[in-house]
C-alpha cells in the first residue's frame, strides 16, 4: 500500500491491485462530476458568437445521449485493457506503436493534461471567486488559482489508491450528489420546460455528437493510469465505463438547461449565475468547486505519469510537482475560457488513436504481454500510419486547429458525411487500417521466414 502512490511504469504487482469495482465507479463518477462538464453542456446550446454550437435543446440532448453511450463504452474497454496489462496508458501504447512510437502520443497527452489542468484551475478559481465575491465582497481570482494549484498537487501526490480511499469515499461523492439534485431543481424552478424545448436553434446533431464524444474520449489516454490498480480486469471495465457514464448525461443536460433557463450569455457566466441564486445555490457551488479539484488532480497526475514514459528515471514526485507548478503558472498567465476548439482538436488525435489500440489489442488475442510492451521494436510503422490516416480523415471532415492549418485543409474542399460526423469515420478508418496493415506485415514476415528456411 505504501508503494502505490509512487508506483512507476512497471506492471502493478498483485499486492497493489487494491481498487474494486465500487472504488472504480466512485472514482470515475467523481471525475465525471465536473463544472467543466456542466459548462460543456452549456456550450452545446450557446450561440456561436458566445463560443457555443447553438444547438436546439432536442438536438443537444440527442447528441448527449448518443455520444455518452458510445464514449463510455470505449472508455470502459480502455479501462479493461489497462487493468489487464497493469501499466499506465502511455506505456500501454508501446505495444501498438513501438517503444519510441509511444513517445508521440505521450507528448500529446502531456500537452492535453496540462491544458486541461489549466482549464480546471481557471474554472475552479472562477467558481471560488464568484462565491467569495457574493459572500465576502472580494474575488481574488489569482489567489484562488494558486490555492487550488496547491490542492491539486497534494491530491496528485496521494496517487489513485489514496485519493479514492481518503478523499472520495469519505467526502466528495455524497456531498456532490445532494448539490446536483438541488441545482437540477434550481435550473428548472420557474422555467417553462416546453418553451425551452421548442426554443429555436441549430439541429446539427453530428457536431454536438463529436463535441460530447471528444470530451469523453479525452479520458481514454488517462484511463489505464488508474485501472492498472484494479483488483480484477472487469473492475477496470465497470469502474471506468459505468462510473463516468452515470453522471455524464444528467450533467451535460443540466448545463444546457441552465444556459437556456437562466439566460446565460457565456460559459463563465454560468458560475456567476449559480452563485447569485441564494444560500442553497452558494452551498451547491461550493461543494462542486471543492470537488472540481479531483479533475485537476487527475490531469496533473496523468501528465506526470505520461512524462515518466519519456523520462522513466526521474522520480514521480518531482514530475508531479513540476506539472502542477506548470499548470498553476499557466492558469495565472493564460485566459483559456472557450475550449470548444481544444476539444475538437483532442478528438482528432485521440479518437483514431483508440481505434488503433483496440484493433491491435484484439489482434493480439486481447492480451498484451510484458514482452510486447517493454521489449518490442522501436517503431511499429503500420499502426502509426493507421493513426495518422485516421487523424487526417477527422481533420478533412472537420478541420480544427491553428488558422494556418485549417486554411490548408479547407483548400482540399472537405465534404462532411451525412452520418457519423468526424469521430466515427476516423475511428473506423484507423481500426480497419490497423487490421489490414498488421495482417500485411505479418504475411510479409512469414514469407520472409519461409524464404530464409
Image (cartoon, rainbow, N blue to C red):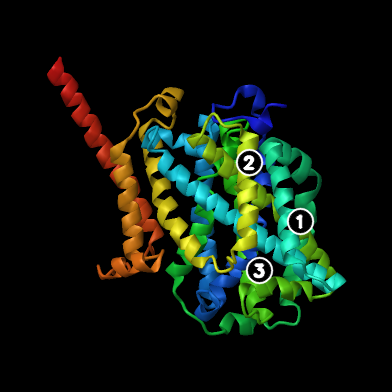
The C terminus - image quarter = top left
The N terminus - image quarter = top right
Write the residue at 63% across / 59% down.
331
Write the residue at 40% across / 24% down.
375
Image coordinates for residue 105, horizontal then vertical, percent: 43, 44
Q: Which residue is mark 1?
A: 290
* Mark earlier in primary sequence (3, 2): 3
Q: Considering the numbered disc 3 on the image, is that residue within a helix, a strand or a loop?
A: helix
What is the residue that sits farthest to the top in this orientation? Answer: 453
Image coordinates for residue 355, horizontal then vertical, percent: 39, 47
Q: Which residue is mark 3?
A: 254
**For residue 397, which quarter of the picture?**
bottom left
Question: Measured along the vertical axis of the image, is residue 34 above or below residue 193?
Answer: above
Question: Measured along the vertical axis of the image, is residue 110 above or below residue 90?
Answer: below
Q: Considering the numbered disc 2 on the image, is that residue within a helix, a strand or a loop?
A: helix
Q: Residues within 10 Å of mark 3 (few under 14, many from 20)?
A: many
Q: Which mark is residue 320?
A: 2
**For residue 348, which quarter of the picture?**
bottom left
Amino acid at each position: 500500500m505504501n508503494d502505490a502512490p509512487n508506483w512507476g511504469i512497471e506492471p502493478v504487482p498483485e499486492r497493489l491491485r487494491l481498487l474494486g469495482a465500487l472504488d472504480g465507479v466512485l472514482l470515475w463518477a467523481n471525475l465525471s462530476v465536473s463544472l467543466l462538464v456542466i459548462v460543456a453542456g452549456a456550450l452545446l446550446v450557446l450561440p456561436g458568437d458566445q463560443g457555443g454550437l447553438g444547438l436546439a435543446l432536442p438536438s443537444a440532448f440527442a447528441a448527449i445521449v448518443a455520444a455518452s453511450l458510445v464514449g463510455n463504452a470505449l472508455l470502459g474497454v480502455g479501462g479493461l485493457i489497462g487493468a489487464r496489462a497493469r501499466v499506465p496508458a502511455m506505456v500501454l501504447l508501446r505495444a501498438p506503436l513501438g517503444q519510441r512510437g509511444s513517445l508521440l502520443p505521450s507528448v500529446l497527452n502531456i500537452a492535453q493534461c496540462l491544458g486541461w489542468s489549466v482549464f480546471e484551475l481557471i474554472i475552479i478559481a472562477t467558481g471560488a471567486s464568484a462565491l467569495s465575491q457574493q459572500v465576502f465582497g472580494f474575488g481574488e481570482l489569482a489567489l484562488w488559482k494558486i490555492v487550488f494549484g496547491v490542492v491539486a498537487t497534494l491530491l496528485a501526490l496521494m496517487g489513485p489508491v489514496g485519493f479514492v480511499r481518503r478523499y472520495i469515499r469519505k467526502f466528495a461523492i455524497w456531498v456532490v450528489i445532494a448539490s446536483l439534485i438541488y441545482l437540477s431543481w434550481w435550473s428548472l424552478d420557474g422555467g417553462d420546460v416546453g418553451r425551452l424545448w421548442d426554443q429555436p436553434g441549430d439541429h446539427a446533431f453530428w457536431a454536438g455528437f463529436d463535441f460530447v464524444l471528444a470530451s469523453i474520449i479525452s479520458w481514454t489516454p488517462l484511463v489505464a493510469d488508474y485501472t492498472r490498480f484494479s483488483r480484477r480486469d472487469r473492475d477496470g471495465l465497470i469502474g471506468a465505463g459505468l462510473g463516468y457514464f452515470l453522471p455524464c448525461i444528467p450533467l451535460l443536460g443540466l448545463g444546457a438547461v441552465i444556459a437556456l433557463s437562466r439566460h446565460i450569455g457565456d460559459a463563465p457566466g454560468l458560475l456567476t449565475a449559480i452563485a447569485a441564486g441564494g444560500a442553497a445555490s452558494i452551498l451547491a457551488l461550493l461543494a462542486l468547486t471543492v470537488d472540481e479539484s479531483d479533475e485537476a488532480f487527475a490531469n496533473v497526475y496523468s501528465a506526470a505519469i505520461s512524462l515518466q514514459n519519456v523520462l522513466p528515471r526521474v522520480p514521480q514526485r518531482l514530475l508531479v510537482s513540476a506539472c502542477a507548478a506548470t499548470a498553476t503558472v499557466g492558469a495565472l498567465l493564460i485566459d483559456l475560457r472557450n475550449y470548444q476548439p481544444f476539444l475538437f482538436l483532442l478528438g482528432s488525435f485521440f479518437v483514431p488513436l483508440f481505434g488503433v489500440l483496440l484493433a491491435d489489442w484484439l489482434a493480439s488475442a486481447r492480451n498484451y504481454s510484458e514482452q510486447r510492451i517493454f521489449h518490442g521494436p522501436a517503431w511499429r510503422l503500420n499502426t502509426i500510419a493507421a493513426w495518422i490516416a485516421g487523424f487526417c480523415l477527422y481533420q478533412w471532415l472537420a478541420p480544427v486547429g491553428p488558422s494556418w492549418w485549417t486554411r490548408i485543409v479547407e483548400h482540399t474542399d472537405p465534404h462532411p458525411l451525412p452520418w457519423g460526423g468526424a469521430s466515427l469515420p476516423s475511428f473506423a478508418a484507423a481500426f480497419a487500417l490497423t487490421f489490414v496493415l498488421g495482417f500485411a506485415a505479418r504475411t510479409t514476415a512469414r514469407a520472409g521466414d519461409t524464404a530464409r528456411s
